[in-house]
Amino acid sequence: MTITKKQITFSQAINDAIQTAMAIDKSVICYGLGVTDPNGIFGSTIGLEEKFGSQRVFDIPASENAVTGVAIGAALDGVRPVVVHQRSDFSLLTLDQMINNAAKWRYMFNGIHSVPITNRLIVGRGWGQGPTHSQNLQALFSHIPGLKVIMPSTTYDVKGLLLSSVFDDDPVIFLEHRWLYNQVGLVPEGDYRIPIGKAKIINKGEDITVVGMSYMTIEALNSIAVLSENKISCELIDLRSIKPIDSKCIIDSVKKTGNLLVLDTACKFGSVASEIITLVVEECFSYLKQSPRRITLPDFPVPTSPALTNNFYPQDLKIMEVISEMLSKKINHQKQERSSIFMHDIPGDWFKGPF
């Protein structure tokens, strides 16, 4: 059987996943602030209302806690809601419902009742949005038993993982980095699902294990291209699923390379990167050639001004410098300056605004 693939963007792959899920199962609904807006949240919800009707796709007011309560009630009654929050920051208003209700029901009732909610949350920087609109909260959600946390980095993965999330019986926090929305890749048509909890080895290597997540995986790929020219062999693991985490994939790789660098989109203290390093130290300490390292954001609120944002976010150059230091190897590279015609804190001219 030939599988047809198409070249689409990250946001189009999200749209495709929701359309596929809604066509498969009439219990799937999609709603959130801006879902029916002409811009469709970076294009990820364009055309859904026209295709599936206003009973299944609809806008909602900015009342996140109440909206989540509605989703929980609907899920307990057999509906599979896909709830969209335009910022992960806004989802903090839903924590009472998500932590004290959604995450607990399946456990409390021995699997008789489940709460199959998919919460799409947008994370990451862009357009100078600053401390209240750019937070990366994956570690916070990962701390809660009963929640699954997903952070895809490719078009293929975002569709397959979103479909798996929609049809999972546990509540899922689905984190999308806004700098990925215009990334292009080949995506199969129709229904396909990537198992939650499985990491992916993007590049095989022998010298060091690099674990990335979300947009930091892209920065790592840029680094590896230069490092390979300098005879440095990196094994890059794209985490994809933050919780459950694929500990076997990470441990097996570190046992082979003896070195570990973890790349996180969030702040250092209490980060997912910290948890991964703890896992490796506990499970395969004797295989390590040196202390594991991590690259994260500083432990400060996200800045807004160009003078600060330009030095706040680690990029491929920082990754190359740390790997060079860890392996005691000098590398030759050329630093590429961002074009001054673009507003600061955006990935390129395609990024027209915060929504």
Image (cartoon, helix red, strand yellow):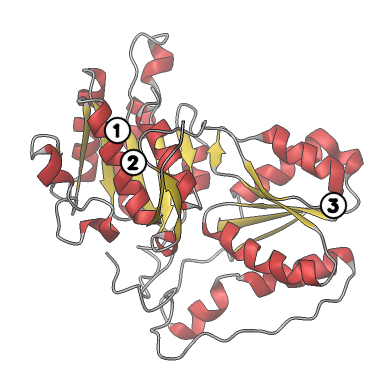
Circles 3 and 1, Cβ within 8 Å, touching? The answer is no
Circles 3 and 2, Cβ within 8 Å, touching? The answer is no
Q: CA distance from mark 3 to mark 1?
A: 40 Å
Which residue carries the number 3 mark?
206
Q: Is residue 267 visible?
A: no
Label annotation for residue 88: none
Q: Position of residue 172 (x, y in %)?
A: 40, 34
Q: Earlier in the sequence, mark 3 or mark 2?
A: 2
> Which residue is rendered at x = 26% and y = 58% of the image?
43
Is 259 situated left or right of 126 in this image? right
Q: Position of residue 69 (x, y in %)?
A: 22, 32
Which residue carries the number 1 mark?
21
Q: Is residue 252 above or below residue 101?
A: below
> Which residue is rendered at x = 60% and y = 35% of the image?
245
Residue 30 found in image quarter? top left
**Callout 2: SS:** helix
Q: CA distance from mark 2 to mark 1?
A: 6 Å
Mark 1 crowd level (few <14, some 14–19, many ≥20, 10 Å Cα)? many
> Which residue is rendered at x = 37% and y = 33% of the image?
191
Circles 2 and 1, Cβ within 8 Å, touching? The answer is yes
Which residue carries the number 2 mark?
17
Residue 275 found in image quarter? top right
Dot 2 amino acid type: Ala
Dot 1 amino acid type: Ala
Q: Is residue 189 above or below residue 112?
A: below
Q: Position of residue 7 (x, y in %)?
A: 41, 55
Quadrant of the image containing the C terminus: bottom left
Q: Nearer the viewer, residue 278 or 44?
A: 44
Q: Residue furthest front?
A: 1
Dot 3 amino acid type: Glu
